[in-house]
Amino acid sequence: MNSISGKPPKLRYALVAFLVITALYVGVLFWLDAKRGLFVGLSSLAAPIAGAMALALVSFFVRYLRWRYLLALEGYTFPFGQGFLAYLSGFAFTATPGKVGELYRIHQFLRFGVPASQTFAAFLLERACDLVVVLLLSLLCISGSRWLGIALFFVGGIVSAVVLLAFSPALFTRLIDSIPLPSRLESIARSLVSGFAAVRVWLSPSVLGVSLIYGFVAWSLTSLAFVLIVRSIGVEVQFFELFGAYPLAMLVGAASMIPGGVGTTETALAALLHGWGVGTSLAVLAAVAIRFSTMWFSILLGLTSIFALSSSAK
């Protein structure tokens, strides 16, 4: 990860990585189309996909309200519309390594006077809260199964690491001081420690409670989007199982460490549906449709936001 600074991230390599991943994804879709007529199925889901996109957009807006709430607690205010575009810009390179989209978001919020460490801290708290929410929603699918322990270990480990780094920055600073590192790596490490330390101001029951409520609303909307798509193809699976399926697949995607969970999230969704007796073709169709409506839609919104922000800055 690049150091947290006021310099805009170099987008050239991220764009190349994004194009490569997109080309591979589209290639797989063409292969699936040749075997299972995927594109015909997707075209028949135009209305449900549009509805799912609308739910996803509201979900992103709710997450932005949480972001704005956290920064307002520290006294940072900014234009509502421009702030929303800056927040969406962080989604632009979801499917690329290195979190370049988050670095671009940091750069945009610097224009509003928000320090880089504070924006990074908001990102950390957002992700930690979302992991907890996604885990709780996924219990509708995995409660009592062997996957419960794995999910608890994964989420608990990440959340514990964020809390530990937030409350013990001096410990990690001393560790950095004791290890000879190249100047570039040392700068990155110190920037990360600064960002983690900034999370501490929000680790109170009231702030965490509000943040989790925002998260529940946002992720419930994406769960409803998945239910909408599955129901539209005539699949009858219990509502609450479907409702928890997308959050569970997101956990699988996050645990895979693949940017955006590309491929792994779709595989998890298809496997869940197949396990409930849904045919392979319909399961794959539903998985690809919800990913178009959420992840790829968020990338489109992010790229559009970058263009809009760049145009307004001229």
Image (cartoon, rainbow, N blue to C red):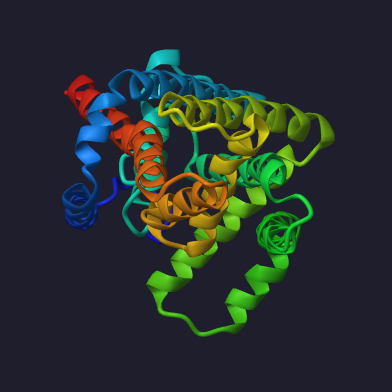
* Relative vertical location of residue 71 with respect to residue 150 in this rendering, above or below: above
Left or right of residue 10: residue 73: right
Image coords of residue 51 (percent x, y): 40, 18
Image coords of residue 307 (percent x, y): 20, 28
Residue at the spot x=47%, y=21% of the render?
Answer: 55
Residue 49 seen anywhere in this rendered image of the structure: yes
Residue at the spot x=69%, y=64% of the render?
Answer: 150
Left or right of residue 66: residue 211: right
Q: Quadrant of the C terminus?
A: top left
Residue 83 seen anywhere in this rendered image of the structure: no
Image coords of residue 236 (percent x, y): 55, 31
Image coords of residue 194 (percent x, y): 58, 54
Residue at the spot x=45%, y=28% of the render?
Answer: 234
Left or right of residue 75: residue 168: right
* Relative vertical location of residue 245 with respect to residue 114 in this rendering, above or below: below
Q: Quadrant of the N terminus?
A: bottom left
Q: Quadrant of residue 232?
A: top left
